[in-house]
């Protein structure tokens, strides 16, 4: 695969395994999100990816920091490089690891959530669902999505947005704007605010795990019918 990663194979077999791709925040690496994967549904094959750009002290970023106050998005070169690299990892997993292409999920925190939204907005048919924690939708990506994805292309997606009420890095308004956009696009929505800052709190992790478990069960039941 193009990006360094940690792979966790399913411990419960359910046909071709569903794929969960985990995207860490700026300054972290694949190890932190891989620890989260251990508490998620055992049917998942999970890939915790390392962002391609080093920040020092064993940390990495998906793109250079944004200047949200001016309404600008991440630098196009880094953001696009990361977006395409994650898409390639998903395709590699489908082709090389035998995962179910109809059950591909993204879970991202902070910068990882922003990147997850950009992938979901520009290539919605690649995914089944997205969990975004403490992220934002860059205006440039939202504008691009209107051109890249036809009307109704996101109606099959299940989206869960989680955000801390006291987040000073990514203000709560970012989550509310993302919620409103996904509602407009017709996605199936979940949204929750937490008594937390810019963090992946235990309550967030528990709710994300339950959301993903519910989605797998829903799809399996629908497929059986």
Image (spheres, rainbow, N blue to C red):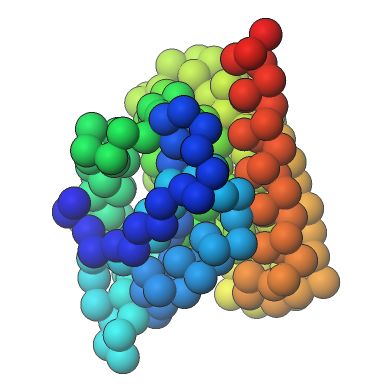
Task: Name the residue furthest right.
Answer: 195
Q: Do we see residue 146 in this rendering?
A: no
Please give the name of the residue rendered at 75% of the width and 74% of the height, measured from the top-left corner.
Answer: 196
The residue depicted at 27 percent of the width and 54 percent of the height is 82
Dividing the picture into quarters, in which one does residue 77 lie? bottom left
Residue 87: percent from the left, percent from the top?
29, 41
Q: Which of 76 and 182 is in front in this view?
A: 182
In the image, farthest residue toward the left: 2
Locate residue 37 relative to residue 8 in the image: left or right.
right
Q: Where is residue 89 in the image (x, y as percent from the top left)?
A: 26, 46
**Which one is nearer the viewer's eye here, 223 or 153?**
223
Residue sitting nearer the eye, 8 or 152: 8
Residue 43 falls left or right of residue 141:
right
Q: Looking at the image, is 186 positioned above or below residue 71?
A: above
Question: Residue at coordinates 39% horizontally, 79% vertically from top-left?
Answer: 27
Residue pushed farthest top?
A: 225
Q: Where is residue 215 in the image (x, y as percent from the top left)?
A: 65, 34
Q: Percent position (x, y) of residue 188?
A: 68, 29
Q: Which residue lies furthest to the front in this view?
A: 12
**Residue at the image position 47 percent from the left and 74 percent from the top:** 32
* Quadrant position of the C terminus in the picture: top right
Examine the image and state in which quarter residue 52 appears. Answer: bottom left
Rendered position, 66 above or below 115: below
């Amino acid at each position: 695969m193009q990006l360094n990663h940690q792979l966790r194979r399913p411990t419960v077999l359910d046909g071709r395994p569903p794929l969960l791709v985990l995207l860490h925040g700026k300054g972290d690496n694949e190890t932190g999100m891989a620890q989260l994967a251990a508490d998620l549904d055992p049917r998942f094959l999970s890939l915790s990816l390392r962002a391609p750009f080093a920040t020092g002290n064993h940390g990495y970023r998906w793109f250079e920091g944004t200047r949200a106050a001016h309404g600008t998005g991440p630098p196009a070169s880094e953001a696009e490089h990361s977006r395409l690299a994650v898409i390639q990892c998903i395709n590699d997993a489908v082709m090389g690891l035998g995962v179910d292409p109809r059950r591909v999920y993204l879970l991202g925190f902070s910068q990882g959530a922003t990147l997850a939204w950009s992938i979901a907005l520009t290539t919605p048919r690649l995914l089944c669902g997205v969990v975004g924690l403490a992220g934002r939708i860059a205006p440039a990506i939202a504008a691009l999505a209107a051109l890249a994805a036809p009307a109704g292309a996101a109606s099959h997606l299940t989206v869960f947005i989680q955000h801390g009420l006291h987040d000073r890095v990514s203000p709560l308004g970012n989550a509310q704007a993302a919620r409103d956009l996904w509602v407009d696009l017709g996605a199936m929505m979940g949204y929750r605010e937490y008594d937390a800052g810019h963090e992946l709190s235990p309550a967030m992790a528990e709710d994300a795990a339950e959301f993903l478990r519910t989605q797998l069960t829903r799809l399996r039941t629908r497929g059986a019918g």
